[in-house]
Amino acid sequence: MSDIRLPRAAEAATQKASKQLGKMPTWNLDDLYPGNESTALKLDLAKAIAEARSFEADYQGKLTDLTASGGLLAAISRYEALSDVTGKIGSYAFLQYVRNTQEADKVKFLGDTSQALTDLSTRLIFFGLELNLIDEAVLEQAFQKDSALARYRPWFAELRKAKPYQLDQKTESLFHEKSVTGASAWNRLFDETMAALEFEADGETLNLEGILNLLQDRDETKRAAAFHGVSKTLTQNARLFTHITNVLAKDKEISDRWHGFKDIADSRHLENSVERDVVDALQSAVRAAYPRLSHRYYAMKARWFGKDKLNAWDRNAPLPTSDERLYDWNAAKETVLEAYGKFSPKLVEIATPFFEKGWIDAPSKPGKSPGAFAHPTVPSAHPYLMLNYLGKPRDVMTLAHELGHGVHQVLAGQQGALMAPTPLTLAETASVFGEMLTFRSLLDKTTDKQQRFAMLASKVEDMLNTVVRQIAFYTFEREVHTQRRAGELTTEDLNRIWLEVSAESLGPAITLNEGYEIFWSYIRHFIHSPFYVYAYAFGDCLVNSLYAQYEKAQTGFAERYLELLSAGGSKHHSELLAPFGLDARDPQFWSLGLSMIERLIGELEANAPS
């Protein structure tokens, strides 16, 4: 029995969108489990709990002896198989929840399942800790003797990087168990609150996706109404969002301090398998480029709109000549698959099942989690894509983006549950590349000069949102987490930091209107994945460099690109980029990626309507 109460306006808007956009796919989660009470799910959970107990009994305190006797491969194989099963259970619980975060039975099921998986995985914490106690020479000797074990060398290498930050097993277990009532609980509160919020604009009651979509409307009065609607509702809930932000920032500080991380983002860099100096170089390069990129572009856009300065609600406004047609679902599908196919038929072969087998959940619905994502689930299953598709050209690009993730996840699945996961910095490569392929395909078909101009402007804005805005978000997070160490932050503190960072990144051609100060509060990544956001800028600059290489020499490029995706997390970014002649550790690497954006802005300036 659901406890959701849908606003009539939201129901009507959903029905209207469905008619305009045609039949859109929804998830078929039966490939994971046929239901919350299914026998298959209950059996898998029971078996996983039993296997975790057995694994603990068989291996705790015995790994050094196992390495010497040649039994380590069997332990890793069991651990990997268990990871696949628990990942499948957790993925199912999460996916059925995000389709309707307001439905009581789904919320309870997610909570109960998360608790069970946390209890189970607590028994396995010893494994990584004890593996890192094995002498390096002993481990290397084991690799030399067993090629099947040596295949896991990259996984061990990543495990070794965490060694300086590991605590004793009892303390690590405490952190792990308390995560259910700590960060995970606050994440869930944020998600359920955000999904339930109602925003008023232009006589309509909308969810977050609907009102953010209205911020890109051609009609300025509608954009302004949407802006004030977002600000009003977020401000009404500012106390809660401020508290969640404070709690999670403090929670992270405690964990970082106990584990010995020196910089507030070091734990994220470790997860991303990227060096701090590489990210610092990226941040510095982008911030130094603000005047040449965002400041320059928005000043141009203000002139195109006949204004001295743009209002905050004009920043993503479409140009008068922009493509405002509505892409129904079939048109979006054909557009993206055609673009993928021009690059490589293999991409289409991998992408097609997403559309045909219930691997995409496309419609925007009340209660559904906002935004879009690709969830890899586990190698024994397949990824699922979530969209909130509303038919705009940017929604087509979002489909291309998430489908890129999905294709990447399918290809990386061959690496197995331990090495398929890709660091965030490289995880954004396929998604942004998919967007670039789709954009270039659409641009090649457009002969009207005004429409081409508008399309280039839209692409530049997407790049600015991916690079400039995400580095600004990273800068905001760094400031928030740094200041939180000195004490709790008020809403006014957070608003001030947001306005300072926004003014620096957007430049003098954007007016930060009253009400904009609270817009930090709906950014989901700040809550779920602190410092995630720089991965978008990393991925965009990387793809710009990759695409430049593709334009120079297309022969053999697709094959090398697919090999990069198939590697998953089995190789460091330096090793994966070497075949393309690229190195993210080279300071010039970022200049190369940013120069493509600068060239497009120059092209727009040279061809701007008088």
Image (cartoon, grey):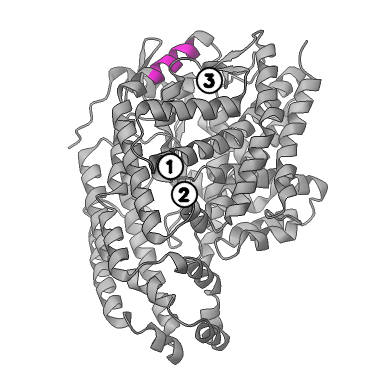
Q: Which residue is mark 3?
A: 216
Name which residue lies at 29% across and 42% down: 186
Q: Determine if residue 390 is in view.
A: no
Horizontal side of 36 relative to 375 (left or right) equals left
Horizontal side of 538 relative to 197 (left or right) equals right
**x and y percent of residue 163 in the render?**
45, 69
Residue nearer the viewer, 317 or 129 = 129
Report the Cα–Cα distance between label 1 and label 3: 31 Å
State the mark number for residue 264. Answer: 2
Which one is closest to the eye, mark 1 or mark 3?
1
Horizontal side of 508 relative to 443 (left or right) equals left
Horizontal side of 435 relative to 580 (left or right) equals left
Total count of labels: 3
Secondary structure state at the residue bearing disc 2:
loop
Toward the left, the furthest residue is 1
Q: Amino acid at mark 2?
A: Ile
Classify mark 1: residues with Cα within 10 Å, few (<14), some (14-19) or many (20+): many
Name which residue lies at 55% across and 83% down: 140
Toward the bottom, the furthest residue is 69
Report the Cα–Cα distance between label 2 and label 3: 35 Å
Q: Quadrant of residue 176?
A: bottom left
**x and y percent of residue 466 in the render?**
59, 36
* On-image quarter of the N terminus: top left
CB atoms at circles 2 and 1 under 8 Å apart?
yes
Q: Which residue is mark 1?
A: 481
Q: Amino acid at mark 1?
A: His
Please tell me which of labels 1 and 3 falls first in the chain: 3
Name which residue lies at 68% across and 18% down: 299
Q: Amino acid at mark 3?
A: Gln
**x and y percent of residue 226 in the render?**
44, 16
* On-image quarter of the C terminus: top right
